[in-house]
Amino acid sequence: MTDQAKLATSVEALVTAKVLCIGDVMLDRFVYGDVDRISPEAPIPVFSVNSDKLMLGGAGNVARNLSGLGAVTYFVAVVGNDNAGKDVTRLIGKIDNTEANLITDPGRRTSIKTRYVASGQQMMRADDESVEAIEGATKNRVITLAKSALKDCEAMVLADYAKGVLTPEIIQELIELANTAKVPVIIDPQSIDYSRYRGADLITPNLKELADATAMAVGDDDEISAAARKLITEHKIASVLATRSGGGMSLISADSFDHFTAEAHEVFDVSGAGDTVAATIAASLAAGVDLNEAVHLANTA
């Protein structure tokens, strides 16, 4: 079978995937406009608003990607009792093949990230959010929903944006539940302390995240391999997928190193690329695709 034929077969299999997605959901607001002059009040550009658009961000974008790939998604996240939370609920409700469990925590603000865009480029981003760790009834509800969903899922993806939902304690409880259910765990990491991801099947740091987590250089294949294997050894993580932007991706385990060359396209904004990688890997593994072919598919995606 040719590489392209094998890839096509893998894509077709994704409609059989059932994935549990848990993490920090956000509301992405894009404000589009023009910048034609500098303010007379200060040396800053004057942004003239033309339109705006709301989209799901963070774990919500992972869920959107899973739906786009044809997978059935069980989605668990936390929102505040606010207008942004209602917008997130409405947008999640529009995603096909998604069973959403949004837990409302009245003590939190739903994360909003507002990006101001002119001439195809981001001018500024403003964040409005709560980042305190969830606890009590909210935490217990996340664990209960995850335990129930794992009975029907073949992969679990954790989208960690350090907004308080995926605390170290919760992550370890979720990994333990998944291990018991023999479900692979894919994590899009955030913290520099990777002990919180101990026991995961795959983590997907970019090069900066890999360097920050290990305090090691990541300038070439040998250095990337050494840094990844430090995480593998210290935290019993099965594999590391180091995403290298225009340099492609490298999949490292304790005894192997495979590099996947980038399929380059000209882009203005790479926001959400990590979400696409995590979603594609999770859907592929859930559909029974082997890890190397899953990475090939994620690289193309």
Image (cartoon, rainbow, N blue to C red):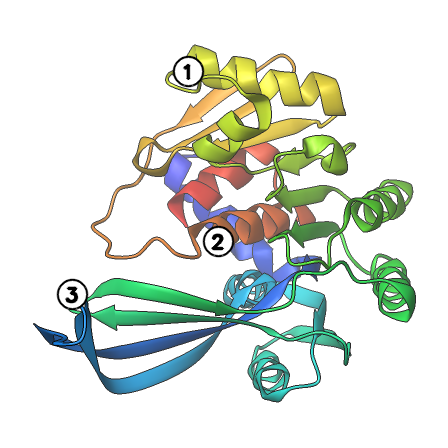
Image location (x, y in percent) of residue 36: 8, 75
Res 175 seen here: yes
Image location (x, y in percent) of residue 241: 54, 32
Query: In this rendering, which labeled residue sits more in front, label 3 or label 1?
Result: 3
Label 3 residue SS: loop
Q: Is residue 184 above or below residue 115?
A: above
* Residue type beneath disc 2: Thr
Q: Are marks 2 and 3 in contact (CB under 8 Å)?
A: no
Q: Residues within 10 Å of mark 3 (few under 14, many from 20)?
A: few
- The residues tagged by marks 2 and 1 sit, at their Cα atoms, a distance apart of 23 Å
Q: Residue furthest front?
A: 41
Residue 221, numbered label: 1
Q: In which quarter of the view is residue 142 placed?
A: bottom right
Q: Are marks 3 and 1 in contact (CB under 8 Å)?
A: no
The residue that disc 2 covers is 276
* Residue type beneath disc 1: Asp
The residue that disc 3 covers is 43
Counting residues from the N terminus, which is met first, the one under dot 2 or under dot 1? 1
Q: Is residue 213 above or below residue 294?
A: above
Counting residues from the N terminus, which is met first, the one under dot 2 or under dot 3? 3
Image location (x, y in percent) of residue 33: 21, 79
Q: Residues within 10 Å of mark 1 (few under 14, many from 20)?
A: few
**Is 271 left or right of 265, judged from the image as shown?**
right
